[in-house]
Each structure stands twice: as C-alpha cells, then as structure tokens.
Image: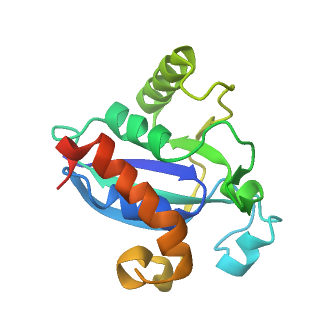
C-alpha cells in the first residue's frame, strides 16, 4: 500500500530530482502547498504573496523505504537552518517545511527533526516547520521531472546536480 509525503526544501526541481531516484518511490509531483491562494500559478508563487511553498508530493512504499528515511534524506539534501531560503533562492516559497498527512507522520517528523537537531550536524538551529497539509496543488507540467528534461540548464548544473550527487554519495544503498 502506497503512502504520501509532502516536503518543501527550496526549489522543487531539486527535491523532485532526488526523490525520483529512490527505490520505493513510485511517483513525485512538484507543486505548491501551505498558502491561501487556490490553484496558484508558478508566477504567483514566485511573488511570495500566496503563502505557498514549492513542494514535492511523493508516493512511496513504506515496506521499501520508510517515512523516517525519506525525511533523513530530505534533511541531508537541503539546508534546514536557513529561514525562507536555499542558497540564492530567497522567499517564503523556499522555506523548509514538512507537510504531514496524518498524526503518525507528524510524530515521526518531529522525532526525526529532533534527532537531527540533537546531532548538531549543521551547527545552527533547524528552522524546518512541521504542519498538517492543508491542500496540494500540482505545478505546471513543465516543472515535472524538470532535471531529466533540462539537464544542461545552468540552474540544473549548478544547483540540482550537486544535490543528486550528494544523494548518490550518502544514500547509494537507497537508489532505484
């Protein structure tokens, strides 16, 4: 039986490229969540006025990869200590956020965040929000699987490719 996770950690192109490569993940959809605008467009979200974060919604088999392991990978591939930014991407739409689908996910998310905060891997407090998922809106088609469609694009080479390389280096045993 498949479950879903919804995560935001900067540009959704990065998260999409990473989570698509994991064994046990059957689908990844880039989209928007956490805001007040219904059916927002990319252009609207980019203004920072919709309240939405760029997120990915991941369908996964918990018998193959646990929710906790997805979260550990999530925390590894982005900087959970920078409020409303990832690198040069700045704004609330780039915030570090875990949108939970039920109480069990909320408990697991808090436990993983606390475990990693206690390990002090980043030398700074974690700012990752944990919130119930209010609604998810899929992004426009051209954002789906963006890295695979545009591997030579400057952003993909400079930002996305290093995150995929980090995944390969730290989680090779989890790759599909």
Q: Position of residue 138 (x, y in %)?
A: 51, 71
Q: In terms of depth relative to the viewer, which is nearer, 92 or 2?
A: 92
**Colour convention:** rainbow
Q: In terms of depth relative to the viewer, which is nearer, 123 or 76?
A: 123
Residue 157 in view here: yes
Residue 41 in view here: no
The residue depicted at 76 percent of the width and 59 percent of the height is: 90
Query: Is residue 61 shown left or right of residue 117?
Result: left
Q: Position of residue 71 (x, y in %)?
A: 42, 37
The residue depicted at 72 percent of the width and 70 percent of the height is: 45
From what the image shows, is residue 87 above or below residue 123?
below
* Residue 68, image quadrant: top left
From what the image shows, is residue 98 above or below residue 46?
above
The residue depicted at 41 percent of the width and 47 percent of the height is: 5
Q: Position of residue 129 (x, y in %)?
A: 65, 36
Residue sitting farthest toward the top: 118
User: Quarter holding the C terminus?
Assistant: bottom left
Q: Position of residue 32 (x, y in %)?
A: 59, 64
* Residue 33, image quadrant: bottom right
């Amino acid at each position: 039986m498949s479950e879903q996770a919804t995560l935001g950690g900067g540009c959704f192109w990065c998260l999409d490229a990473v989570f698509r490569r994991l064994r046990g993940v059957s689908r990844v959809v880039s989209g928007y969540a956490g805001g007040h605008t219904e059916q927002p467009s990319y252009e609207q979200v980019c203004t920072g006025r919709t309240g939405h974060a760029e997120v990915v919604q991941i369908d996964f088999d918990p018998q193959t990869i646990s929710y906790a392991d997805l979260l550990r990978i999530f925390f590894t591939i982005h900087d959970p200590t920078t409020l409303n930014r990832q690198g040069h991407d700045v704004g609330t739409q780039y915030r570090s956020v875990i949108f939970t689908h039920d109480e069990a996910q909320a408990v697991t998310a808090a436990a993983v965040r606390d475990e990693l905060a206690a390990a002090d891997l980043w030398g700074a407090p974690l700012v990752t929000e944990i919130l119930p998922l209010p609604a998810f809106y899929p992004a426009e088609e051209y954002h789906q699987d963006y890295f695979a469609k545009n591997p030579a694009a400057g952003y993909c080479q400079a930002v996305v490719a290093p995150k995929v390389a980090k995944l390969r280096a730290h989680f090779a045993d989890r790759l599909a």
